Image (cartoon, coloured by chain):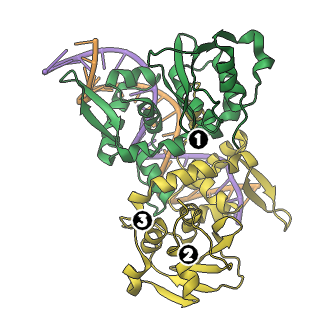
Chain colours: A green, B yellow, C orange, D purple
Amino acid sequence: MSRSYGQYCGLARALDVVGDRWNLLIVRQLLMSPARYRELRDGLPGVATNLLADRLRDLETAGVIERRLAEEGNAVVYALTPWGAGLREPVEGLIRWSTPLMIRGPGGDHFRAEWLVLPLSTLLADRTATRRPWRVGVGVDDGLVLVRTSHSGVEAGPHDGGDLDAVVRADAQIVLGLAAGVLALDDVRGLVDIEGDEAAVRAVFNSPTRS
Amino acid sequence: MSRSYGQYCGLARALDVVGDRWNLLIVRQLLMSPARYRELRDGLPGVATNLLADRLRDLETAGVIERRLAEEGNAVVYALTPWGAGLREPVEGLIRWSTPLMIRGPGGDHFRAEWLVLPLSTLLADRTATRRPWRVGVGVDDGLVLVRTSHSGVEAGPHDGGDLDAVVRADAQIVLGLAAGVLALDDVRGLVDIEGDEAAVRAVFNSPTRS
DNA sequence: CCGCATCCTCATGGATACTG
DNA sequence: CAGTATCCATGAGGATGCGG
């Protein structure tokens, strides 16, 4: 664990726990779903394997994550504790704050479709859901993210294999621009591929924000 | 500037900008008020002066902070840009998340009364304000933090020298426990010193949360 | 294979002295 | 006062090893 700030301040103590490099990205992965060591390593391109092991130990000691035994028996699965799951708010706050950094496009950075789950969740959460419920797949590269109506608005998550009313495919940059309201669907028609119920797709990206 | 994560992910890009050690603590200081170099150094015990200078440069380059000329003429003052001020949400989220780390008490850590401003702001913000407006000073050590009613609830900030309806003095740990709702005022009567209008103090710490 | 531990190199952080 | 310059300790990154 890195050096403590030694300050009796909530932010400093929070950063003593999750401020070290890679820690919040590990939390990001686990906010989507519990995962095995290898899955974490795959979802965190660039992490050194010894650092990942170190950080998992630190976070477990601090009570942010816990090791569970997978259903298959002896496999270890890492998951957030209830307290660790409380990091969703500040993490989503940082994601919303980062919008200006994302609409510039990916540059040469790594990208994984699953990384759209949290941004879509938080950017679409306060959209008013339409009358009839829908489930839409948002596809980038080879991945598919599920966006659907929920009791209180719109939710995103990993694709669960269930039926979809529609599938939208576009570059990640465009998907984020649409979700953030920086782009309108009609402005990028040629860059977006829509299959299925177009009305459902419009409900995702063009419905007014509750504000 | 530290090594980039190289991930096209909002959280990773946000941390590329503010994830380096000390960066968010500098933002914490500037969320309270613009400050000069020396004030930042004083408010960040433990920071090395070269690191502070480095970080201020990085944050300015990234567009999080800006250098301003003070009213007195040639003095430089650091302040958040509008985008940088948008970090208030995730920072307050981390502060709320850190409550379990704070109610354990200060241990041997440094403490400054001004560090209560952000926690009091975010922990009391959704308390319903009483009918008549009040201004209460919360005192720890030698410092005094202002808590007052606002149009939409309760606000905290640096003491502005104006008249106060009451002053409460207690240890920082107790103040935070009261604000977080972990302690009730009557449970710690002997440890809290109240001057002035006690009803105003009760309005700060005992009014029901809006939930 | 998966889940780490070890080793080595180099970038970053920390403490202090120094300068315009 | 507002930073630079310097030096040393520490942590990150990458390759590889190793037991289950």
Q: Residue at x 60, y 86 (%)?
A: B166
Nearest to the eye among marks 3 and 2: give it: 2
Amino acid carrying label 2: it is Val
From what the image shows, is residue A9 above or below residue A176? below
Instruction: Give whichever of B123, B83 is nearer the camera.
Output: B123
Q: Quadrant of residue A85?
A: top left
- Mark number for residue B69? none
Same-chain status of marks 2 and 1: no
Subunit ID for the residue under disc 1: A
Callout 1 amino acid: Leu
Q: Which residue is mark 2?
A: B204
Q: Earlier in the sequence, mark 3 or mark 2?
A: 3
Camera-side residue of A197 and A82: A197
Binning the other alpha carbons within 10 Å of mark 1 as few (below 14), some (14 to 19) or many (20 upward) gives many
Instruction: Tell me where residue A114 appears, x and y as whole percent.
Output: 50, 22
As helix, strand or loop, the secondary structure at mark 2 comes to: helix
Along the viewing direction, whichever of B40 and D9 lies nearer the viewer: B40
Please tell me in which quadrant of the rendered image residue A187 appears.
Answer: top right
Which amino acid type corresponds to the residue marked 3 in the rendered image?
Asp
Q: Is residue A34 left or right of residue B39?
A: left
Res A27 seen here? yes
* Numbered label attached to residue B109: 3
Q: Which mark is residue A94?
A: 1
Q: Position of residue A13 (x, y in %)?
A: 44, 55
Labels 3 and 2 within one chain: yes
Q: Residue furthest front?
A: A131
